[in-house]
Image: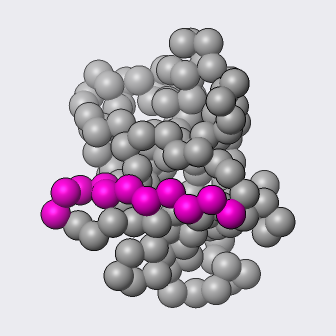
Amino acid sequence: MAAIPFENLDVLLGRPVRLDLASLQAKLVDARRGGYCFEHVTLFAAVLEQLGFTPVRHSACVVLVNPRTAAPRTHMFLTVPLAEGTFVVDPGFGVLAPKVPLPLEDGEKVTFDPVSSRPEIVCQVFFAAPTIEVSSGEPRRLSALR
């Protein structure tokens, strides 16, 4: 997850973004370019599937300033069911994303330090209103909408 940077140059330049695996491998692996969350997550899900996991893809809203109801679903992340429980994996959220899978437990808070020089981030998940809240000094929220 750390080897492929976040980058949305194709979107900004008005170029089509291709999400088929051959195009993703050519861009992210062979050309050593970065990508945006849908590219990261699609490629990472394919890797997990090849390793025998069954990742579930989710679209989501990233809420920084606007309320959740006004934020478009412009983000993508994965959940991975295992015998130990279900885990959130977000390879396309940049530096604030956890580098390890986070347990998905109703109301459970998970604290992690994304970069040693930054404050801790707290992630809390609520099933009743499917929301993943991520916060540090300033509130940041990632809302999972199925």
Query: Is residue 61 shown left or right of residue 7?
Result: right
Quadrant in the picture for residue 113: bottom left
Extreme residue toward the bottom, this view: 66
Toward the viewer: 103 or 2? 103
Residue at 16% from the left image edge and 63% from the top image edge? 117
Q: Quadrant of the C terminus?
A: bottom right
Above or below 8: residue 121: below
Above or below 50: residue 14: below
Question: Majority secondary structure of the magenta segment?
Answer: loop
Quadrant in the picture for residue 144: bottom right
Query: Is residue 126 shown left or right of residue 139?
Result: right
Q: Is residue 68 magenta?
A: no
- Give the image location of residue 134, x and y in percent: 50, 68
Give the magenta range: 107-117
Count of numbered labels shown in the rendering: 0
- Give the image location of residue 24, x and y in percent: 45, 30
